[in-house]
Amino acid sequence: MTRSLTERLGQAGIVVDEGDAPPVLEMPWFVRALQAFSGWLAALFLLGFIGMGAVFVLDSSAAAASLGLVMIAGAFALLRGANGDFVEHLALAGSLAGQLLVAWALGAALGSVSAGFWWSLVGLQAVLALVMPSLTHRTFSAFAASLAFYLALTEGVSAPSLAGGLVLFSLTILWLNEFRWPAYMRQLQALGYGLLLGLLAIQVMGYRGQSLLLGRYGYGTGLAWLEPWVGDGLATLALLLLIRYVFQRRRHAIAPSARVAAYGAAAVLMLLSLQAHGLSQGALVVALGFAIGNRLIMGLGVMLLLLAITNYYYWLDATLLAKSVTLCLLGVLLLTLRWVLRRRWQIDRRVAAGEDESQ
């Protein structure tokens, strides 16, 4: 038996009818910002007093790890009962301090900042992103996990673009399944925003030609032979997944010619990305934001695309003529695809409307 729309919206946390209950007034953004600032300020003073009295724990990795885990557990307890921005940001600051203590203990125990250290941080941040009862904390943990993942692959197998490609593929799957579990929709969105911000930071560091630790790593071993095309390959695979998702949702409104044009555009974009790395990733994020109707994702995708174009324009290994031809082909491709899709989509919508009326 099909559930009613009201029940489905209620399970998703959307209140349809509250009867005679008074409307809930939302707090202005500047008041929330002031509360958040107050929470961070109070946390800094509190952590300063704790640090002055417990500085000796830095001499012992076990004591530092224990204190860090206690602070993270305390932040978890505060966040579970938090009903305001002040308490939430106070707990977030305490959690960050605890994470720094745990990272310090891991570095001291391992003896050096190696791939094992970064993989340990990936595990820690992944657990926090999944269990912390705060959307802000989930976003930050997803962001930190993506950066630690980038550094782990850079240190271990010398494949930074592989990290960016995998993060991009993961966030694409996450956003395409945004409404699959309505009860966890807000949590999935927080994870998606964190991964997207992490991808933006990874791309900025990649375009600068250095890691987050200011050029500590050299790319000559491991999977370095995959660089930098593996990231563009994963972006193209995610783009094909997105096109398939759109076609499945609008199977009766898209003609075969539009399908061929879309897959052909993906192939051409992949070829252009072999010359100008990062174009496919920015184009994918823009298309993803447009497909799911999220303007913030579209804005971040435009930033990724502009970063890729700027990096390619100042790339010294290609002539200005080659750069001009590549960027011109990209512009013509995007404009042609837009014109074809708009023209065919209007025709197909009319055809679909005529079929519905005949039925």
Image: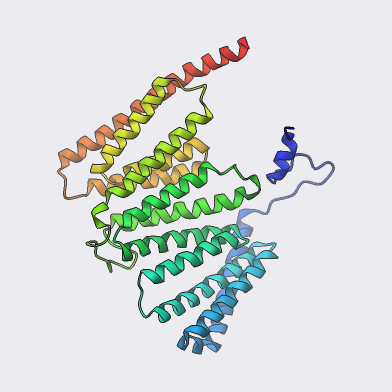
Residue 253 is situated, as x and y percent measured from the top left of the image, at 51, 22
Residue ranking furthest to the right? 20
Figure quadrant of residue 5: top right
In the displayed structure, does residue 354 sit left or right of residue 258? Answer: right
Colour pattern of the rendering: rainbow
| Residue 305 in view | no
Q: Nearer the viewer, residue 72 or 236?
A: 236
Q: Is residue 126 above or below residue 297?
A: below
Q: Is residue 138 above or below residue 114?
A: above
| Residue 116 in view | yes
Q: Is residue 19 above or below residue 128?
A: above
In the displayed structure, does residue 355 sit left or right of residue 227? Answer: right
Residue ranking furthest to the top? 358
In the displayed structure, does residue 20 sit left or right of residue 294? Answer: right
Q: Is residue 353 above or below residue 109?
A: above
Residue 3 is situated, as x and y percent measured from the top left of the image, at 73, 35
Going 60% across and 50% down the picture, which residue do you hit?
186
Residue 229 is situated, as x and y percent measured from the top left of the image, at 28, 48
Going 47% across and 16% down the picture, which residue do you hit?
347
Q: Nearer the viewer, residue 17 or 32?
A: 17
Going 63% across and 73% down the picture, which residue do you hit?
74
